[in-house]
Amino acid sequence: MEKNNLRAHLALLVAMIVWGSSFIALKTAVTAMSPMIVVFLRMTIGAVAFLVVWPWLRHGLRYQQGDWKYLIGMALFEPCLYFLFEVQALQYTSAGQAGMITALLPLLVAATAFYFLKERNTLRQWSGLIIAVLGVIVMTVTSQSTDQAPNALLGNALEVCAMMAAVGYIMLAKHLIHRYSAFVLTATQQFVGALFFLPMAAQADWPSELPMIVFGSVIYLGLVVSIGAYGLYNYSLAQLNASTAAGYTNLLPVFTLMFSMLLLGERMQRLQWLAIGLVFVGVFLSQKTTRVVPKDVPPGVTG
């Protein structure tokens, strides 16, 4: 393996680890203060960071008249609607279960592309979609109420809504990616997200003091996840083909589950492990030889 390829594979692996850990950081933060404050701070930190590096980002900007509608729509889907659903979901379900539901995203994208873009899917792919959805249902209905998942049914349903918002983002990002770099699109998301969540954060009850672990989680989400993971992801795309990069995204729920068990003490029942297996089988069966989404589109799930 060439040296550059090895670095690209390592970059992808680290990016997936960072994205997988973002669910744990978000879960930690929303249990200590208002979810709207958490998301607002994360978006603001990310926006400020992107503002610092803007002189390098603007080279990936080729604005075309009328694109503002697509840019705003993209950002409204994610992070706005996405995080409205996800931060509420993580109040009711565990980080591990929420992370597993992210495995449905490629399948939802394929189904949406079939309906709106007339993309053809095989019987194997539809079978994979059904099996994966069945796995999520089994994982949800077999979940017992715990401190980490007081109402898994509601939480997982909200996480599915977050995935549907991510699908809307991906469809619009696919339209824009040929004129704007992934970093420009991500920066747009941060700025619009900060403005969107500002009124809700202003009305929330701000804590008088912030535990260090919560403060660190918010900084981690705003800097390491929003910029670091995307930087590693885009570096790898310059060295590897699209299908290789796509394969790594299937590790996201695995890392999320690992982190949730190690750091949050989450435990899965035997039937839930079977359900997790069904999700992965469904994802495997649904894999396409060609991708609906161009390789430059940033992943829809930012955790």
Image: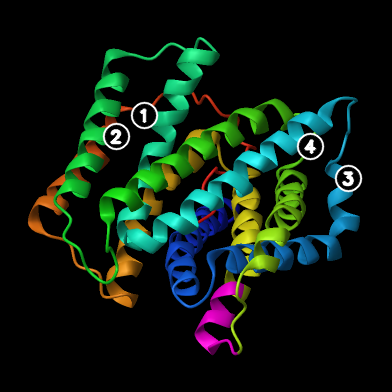
Q: Mark 2 sits on what residue?
A: 284
Which residue lies at the image location 77% right of the left edge and 66% below the top edge?
49
Q: Mark 3 sits on what residue?
A: 59
User: Which residue type carries mark 3?
Assistant: His
Inter-mark Cα distance, 1 to 4:
27 Å
Which residue lies at the image location 56% right of the left edge and 29% below the top edge?
293
Q: Mark 4 sits on what residue?
A: 180
Q: Which of 61 and 82 lies nearest the eye of the viewer?
A: 82
Q: Earlier in the sequence, mark 3 or mark 2?
A: 3
Magenta extent: 209-218
- Helix, strand or loop at label 3? It is helix
Inter-mark Cα distance, 3 to 1:
34 Å
Question: Which-is-in-front pick, marks 1 and 4?
Answer: 4
> Where is 82 relative to 35, above or below?
above
Residue 231 in the image, given as x and y percentages of width and height: 66, 56
Q: Earlier in the sequence, mark 1 or mark 4?
A: 4
Tell whether 125 sits left or right of 276: right
- Kindly indicate whether the residue at mark 1 contacts the one at mark 2 (C-beta within 8 angstroms): yes
Is residue 298 among the parts visible in the rendering?
no
Q: Earlier in the sequence, mark 3 or mark 4?
A: 3
Q: Mark 1 sits on what residue?
A: 287
